[in-house]
Amino acid sequence: MNFEHSIDMKELKALKVELTRFMMAYKFALDEMNTKINILKEEFNYIHDYNPIEHVKSRLKSPESILKKVYRKGYDFSLPVIKEKIRDIAGIRITCSFISDIYKLSKMLDNQKDIRVVDYKDYIKNPKPNGYQSLHLILEIPIFMSDRVETTNVEVQIRTIAMDFWASLEHKIYYKYNQEIPGHMIDELKEAATMAAELDRKMERLHKDIIEIKHANQEEDGENMVLTIEKDNIHIPFFEPLRPKK
């Protein structure tokens, strides 16, 4: 990588030190978001007896990776510009079971009082031309330091297992092998994305049917309601509604 006259090595080292301090805010933002997501997952599990989240993966771009992107995009080498222009320094990928879970989770995140959604891109309702599907959010979250408050961006991608599987393989084909992809393979990848989307829709229908059956059974067995919190069972008595005497 050749920065030519844009920045010399001494300036680069000084900027890297500044970036290390700068990126502490992004690390703390990831910690904060992971805590929030875990709380939402646990709450949802207790209330609905169902876990909508399969996997959560977070990553922080390295200073070297950030500098390469700054150079590639032609941005100025300054922290304010980096903060404004590069919004995926801190990233979280959430894999859900069903499409409906994606929108439920995004709504729960949006309802958090200290989170602001600054960008929302729905590649599920509007897939990319290559077939890629996912919901992308840029969230702004305040990080309380000892001497200041840093508002920090976190990119959140929410997708189903099928979407994540397709995206992972597509990434390997395009970037890991670093080869020109023949046209017929591009067509097959798009066809595979269509098949994955159809699988998601089919599993969503099955999921809704199972929920309806479960609700019907719960109404019949209402007198045996049990609430489980931290492995402790709490039996909730069921009272028949009072009927007027004839």
Image (tube, rainbow, N blue to C red):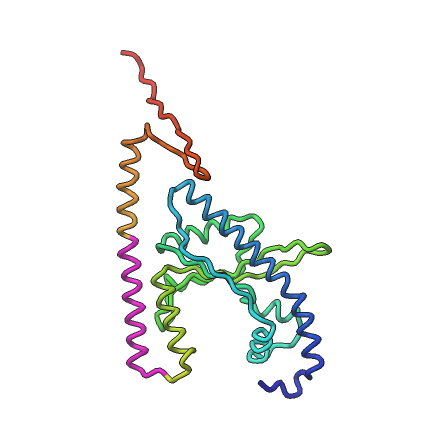
- Picture coordinates of residue 119, whole percent (x, y): 51, 61
In this view, the residue farthest toward the top is 246
Residue most extreme to the right: 147
Q: Is residue 62 left or right of residue 226?
A: right
Closest to the observer, 141 or 53: 53
Magenta-colored span: 181-204
| Number of disc labels | 0
In the rendered image, residue 163, in percent from the top left (x then y), is placed at 36, 64
- Residue depicted at 27% across the width and 62% down the height: 198
In this view, 139 is above or below 67: above
Q: Give the quarter of the image for residue 178.
A: bottom left
Residue that appears at 54% across and 67% down: 88
Q: Quadrant of residue 165?
A: bottom left
In the image, residue 17 above or below residue 43: below
Quadrant housing residue 184: bottom left
Query: Does the stretch in magenta take in 203?
Result: yes
Q: Quadrant of the C terminus?
A: top left
Write the residue at 57% across / 69% down: 86
Q: Position of residue 9 (x, y in %)?
A: 68, 83
Quadrant occupied by the N terminus: bottom right
Q: Is residue 150 magenta?
A: no
Query: Where does residue 87 sit, x and y in percent of width and height?
Result: 56, 66
**Main SS class of the magenta portion in the image:** helix
Q: Residue at x 30, y 79 (%)?
A: 185
